[in-house]
Amino acid sequence: MMNGAQQQAFQRMGQYGQPGQYGQPGSGSWQGQPGSADDDDYDHYNVEGSDRGSRGNQNWNQSRGRGDFDFDLGGNLGEDIGGAVLGAAFGLAGRAFAKRMKKAFDDKVVPAMQAKAAQAQAQFERQKAEQDAIAARYPELRGCMKDQVVFLDGGTRTVPVSEIKMPVTMAQADGVVARLR
């Protein structure tokens, strides 16, 4: 059993396809539908570029395989042969250029990046060892991240974190602990 609103909706949909009710100019129908006075032959269901049929049913990879030169063979044969030679030459030059760029990248950039990574790793290891040494020497040293201060466990004095230069060295930790005692 249908309620009244659904029944009316189905009646309207049934009337939509009947001539004289909807779809005729001046009948009070929606003005943008096909066949209406202001349609202007605009395809409301195909936004430009969204219809696969308008692209020749190709995916992006199929369109990449074609070269930049389109050969017709119906016009000037000399121009077509010249275009083919230029296309082949540009293809070979592009591949040779890509090989040279890869070789330069492998020979220069990769070793430089590896050296920087090794240097950063060594620096990280040194800083971690320094922090471990500070924690072992001053186990009562604490920090509050909410208030951004450093203090000694059981003490009343604090030092703002903004006054401590990062990364913290053992000499800096000695100075901070001396201020807190």
Image: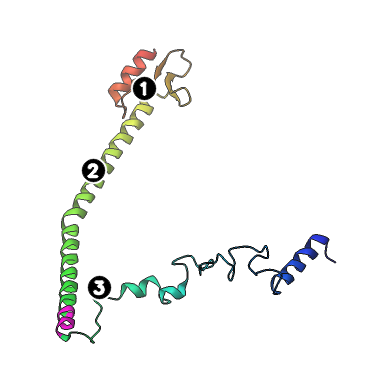
Q: Secondary structure at mark 1?
A: helix
Q: Compared with residue 129, is residue 150 higher up or lower down, i.e. above or below? A: above
First along the sequence among labels 1 and 2: 2
Where does label 1 land, which residue?
A: 162
Q: Residue furthest front?
A: 26
Name the element at disc 2. Answer: helix
> Could you say which quadrant of the image residue 80 lies in?
bottom left
- Check the picture and name the quadrant holding the N terminus: bottom right
Q: Which residue is mark 2?
A: 119
Question: Which of pointers 2 and 3 indicates the residue nearer the eye?
Answer: 3
Determine which residue is flagged by label 3.
68
Magenta stretch: give its range.
Answer: 78-84
Q: How far is the residue under mark 2 from the one under mark 3?
A: 46 Å
Q: Which residue is drawn at the image coordinates 19% and 62% (left, top)?
A: 102
Instruction: Please tell me which residue lies in front, 88 or 143.
Output: 88
| Image quarter (top left, top right, bottom left or bottom right) of the C terminus | top left
The amino acid pointed to by label 2 is Gln
